Amino acid sequence: MFKNLFGKKDKQTEETILAPLTGKVVNLDQVPDPVFSQKMMGDGLAIEPAEGTVVAPVDGEIVQFFHTKHAIGLRSKTGLEILIHIGLETVTLEGEGFEGHVKEGDKVKEGDRLITFDLDFIKEKAKSAVTPIIITNGDRVESLDKQANMRVTKGDTEIMNVHLKQ
């Protein structure tokens, strides 16, 4: 079971997002890419990964899986859309170092393995291994409680609690 940092949740108006990676959570403003640090794609957090496995942070559906396997988009049961972008400037790797375990349209449960990647390779070849986790449909969000500057375990630790608009 996951650590409950936010208290009881109402399934209709709230969505809890678990850590999709093991590592250290950092605020988006610390991500060395203005697209993420200035929240151009949406609000969220980032994780400095300690290992190369990405798991589903929510129950939902895979709505986008980039052919380069560096990023994946999910839609939760409440309609929240989440982008997980592994590393910075990793699109240029053309999929090298990444392995996908799902495809668009797949239904997933919290903790299901989505992508594995060679962390050492990413650290060597990409600008950064830091992995933003972004809410891309922020118009559905009333407020967002985030946990930062802490160590998290994939599929176990809550990193965001999203209060949805009614």
Image (cartoon, rainbow, N blue to C red):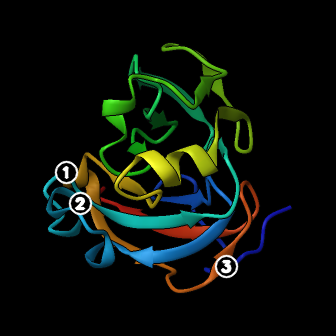
Q: Amino acid at mark 3?
A: Arg
Using a 10 Å C-alpha cutoff, classify the residue at mark 1 as few (fewer than 14 neighbours), some (14 to 19) or many (20 or more): some
The mark lying in front, picked from 1 and 3, is 3
Q: Secondary structure at mark 3?
A: strand
The disc label shown at residue 151, or none: 3
Residue occupying image coordinates x 53% and y 67% = 48
**Residue 130 vertical placement versus 62 (above, below):** below
Q: Nearer the viewer, residue 118 or 33?
A: 118
Instruction: Name the residue furthest right.
Output: 1
Residue assigned mark 1: 41
From the viewer's perspective, is residue 144 above or below residue 10?
below
Q: Are marks 1 and 2 in contact (CB under 8 Å)?
A: yes
Residue 105 image point, x, y percent: 51, 13
Query: Which amino acid is tagged 2?
Result: Phe
Tell me which numbered mark, 1 or 2, is placed earlier along the sequence.
2
Whether tag 2 and tag 3 are in contact, CB under 8 A, the answer is no
Q: Secondary structure at mark 1?
A: loop
Q: CA distance from mark 1 to mark 2?
A: 7 Å
**Distance in Å between CA atoms under marks 1 and 3:** 24 Å
Q: Image quarter for residue 51? A: bottom right
Instruction: For mark 2, give the secondary structure.
Output: helix
Q: Where does the image place residue 122, in percent across and percent down from the top left? A: 51, 46
Residue at 30%, 55% (x, y): give it.
166
Give whichever of discs 2 and 3 has the lower sequence position: 2
Check residue 36 in the rendering and tell me which mark sits there, or answer none: 2
The x, y position of residue 17, in whole percent, is 56, 58
For residue 57, above or below residue 64:
below
In front here: 153 or 6? 153
Using residue 67 as the reference point, say whether residue 102 is left or right of it.
right
Is residue 86 at least partly visible in the picture? no
Q: Residues within 10 Å of mark 3 (few under 14, many from 20)?
A: some
Of labels 1 and 3, earlier in sequence is 1
